[in-house]
Image (cartoon, rainbow, N blue to C red):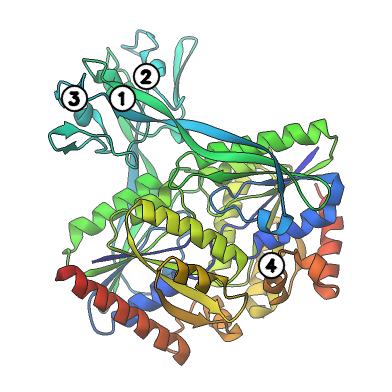
Amino acid sequence: MKEIVIISGKGGTGKTSITASFAYLGGKDVIVADCDVDAADMHLLMQPDIGRSEDFYSGLLAEINQEKCIKCGKCADVCRWDAIPIIDNQYIVQALDCEGCGYCARVCPTDAIRMIEQNVGDWFISDIKTGTKMVHAKLGVGAENSGKLVAKVKNEAKALAEKEEKAIIIVDGSPGIGCPVVSSLSGANYVILVTEPSVSGIHDLKRVYELVKKFGIKAGCIINKADINIKKTNDIHTLLKEENIDLICEIPYDENFTKAMTMGKTIVEFDNGKIKQILEDSWEKIKIAN
Amino acid sequence: MKIAIASGKGGTGKTTLATNLASFLAETEKIILVDLDVEEPNSGLFISGENIHEEDKFKMIPEWKKDECILCGNCQKVCNFNAVMKLGEMIMVFPELCHGCYACSELCPTKSLPMKPKKMGELKHFKSGNLVFIESKLIIGEEQAVPLIKQTLNYVDRNFPKRTIEIFDAPPGTSCPVIEATKDADLILLVTEPTPFGLHDLKLAVETMKELKKEMGVIINRFGIGDANVERYCEKNNIPIIAKIPNMRKIAEIYSEGNLLYKKIPEVKTQLEDIIAFISKFQQEVTL
């Protein structure tokens, strides 16, 4: 089984639109996983029919039983996040500040503090319009542990691919270089870096590739909006050569990406010309890349 | 006053707005711009200035000292993040999993896990005329952005008086780094684009900011592409649309070079003036 993860470092480079196109081109042969759980958008192009939906519990939150509390203040003293202020003469845990370490509960002399498992989101397995299944998730507002939810989505996608004997998993990764990206990358066989020829695009590409290198995963690059700045596109070419990253393709700036999106379509369903050809050729390359 | 510029979706123009707004405001008053997107900070690519100060930022993690350790395993028991483990005759610490709660260290009966600093990022402080610019960058391989965001905000609080306008360039998304970057802000400016992805992620951002009980306004970037659903949503939910930055290929080209827009594109300057008027009005209402 081959796991292809698409990431970008910088947001807004067209990562999800391109991932959805590959999912469309892969059709029944692939399982799709949306690991951008913070701002999951794949479903807007894949029209999922949700078959299975489950709560995801991860991480803990302290809760103080006021009847048992003797107001000694030990919990507030040991809390490194100042999450237990005194409000109206009571120690109250601030949910958004609590890290879930449980130190307070361990030092409480009257066992007044309980650590409660948090529902941080939901995950789903859905039938999508390409005749296959997609695993996706929705992270709760302001929730922590997005990395763990990403790991859950990926593991479910893997199990599904095995069960249904699909050779390829296509993963839409998250932006940045933090824990959700690290989770997205672990276990991947091939990484596609989507970038754009701008100072920010190049800066973020370099940083996220440093992370990919730590995992030792082979990578290819797609330069989107390549004609916006030819000089910067050439700079990216140089970088790719130096780092031995495959250049998968260059895609010109095209507002049809947005037009397709407003119709809930991938660009390969909407465009019958050049862009569709580029993405079809790219998908053939990606399938055999390793 | 603290203004956070946020968005659910990445790449909608947070950094563009933050850098242009801060530079434009700094033509007449002192402004502090803080890049809190510590995973991928980009504001510094658009702002140049004199380097005032640099410092490494550290998180505290336990380090095992085997001499006094009696291998009781209490450290492993009290760690909720599986960052400390007793393996045979050894105690292993996994720094990337450690949240720095000190429980293992302080509850160790023989004090065999003293907390030691580990570098997680770098803070830089620049100045250019009225504009103060502060950015922090997370070391690659460090997974937790929140401690670095927190320390960066502490640096700003320690070094500047409260009355100055502070603009925060927040990370994308809605999870813990966004909460840390926005929770102390007085006003949130949400940047979006008029597309289904933009709208979907805007809704998530609005829900998050409502949870934090924040005042907010929306800026539509790339106005003219896509559809009118973002405007409809804002009207229906009584969220003011403060500005509409037009969709122009020229903007993407100027941006790609790392240049500011408002000096070259009058349409952008007009929109910035509308945003500044909104901020002034908000400031007056708050101080009344």
Subunit of mark 3? A
Give the number of the mark in front: 2 or 3.
3
Residue that label 1 marks: A103
Where A63 sits versus A8, above or below? Answer: above
Instruction: Tell me the mark number nearer the camera, choosing from 4 and 1.
Output: 4
A63 horizontally vs A233: left or right? left
Q: Residue B78 bears which disc, if any?
A: 2
Subunit ID for the residue under disc 4: A
The 10 Å Cα crowd at callout 4, few under 14, some 14 to 19, many 20 or more, is: some
Q: CA distance from mark 2 to mark 3?
A: 16 Å
Tell me the SS state at disc 3.
helix
Residue under label 4: A261
User: Where B98 sits versus B155, above or below?
Assistant: above
Label 2 – label 4 distance at C-alpha: 49 Å
Quadrant of image for the N terminus of chain A: top right
> Is mark 2 in CB contact (under 8 Å) with mark 4?
no
> How far across and down, in percent of the image, does residue B169 sit?
39, 64
Which mark's residue is nearer the viewer, 4 or 3?
A: 4
Q: Which amino acid type corresponds to the residue marked 2 in the rendered image? A: Val
Do marks 1 and 2 share a chain?
A: no
Mark 4 or mark 1, earlier in chain: 1
Q: Do discs 2 and 4 share a chain?
A: no
The residue at 59%/50% (across/down) is A36
Of mark 1 and mark 3, the one earlier in the sequence is 3
- Is residue B78 found left or right of A234 in the rendered image? left
Chain ID at mark 2: B
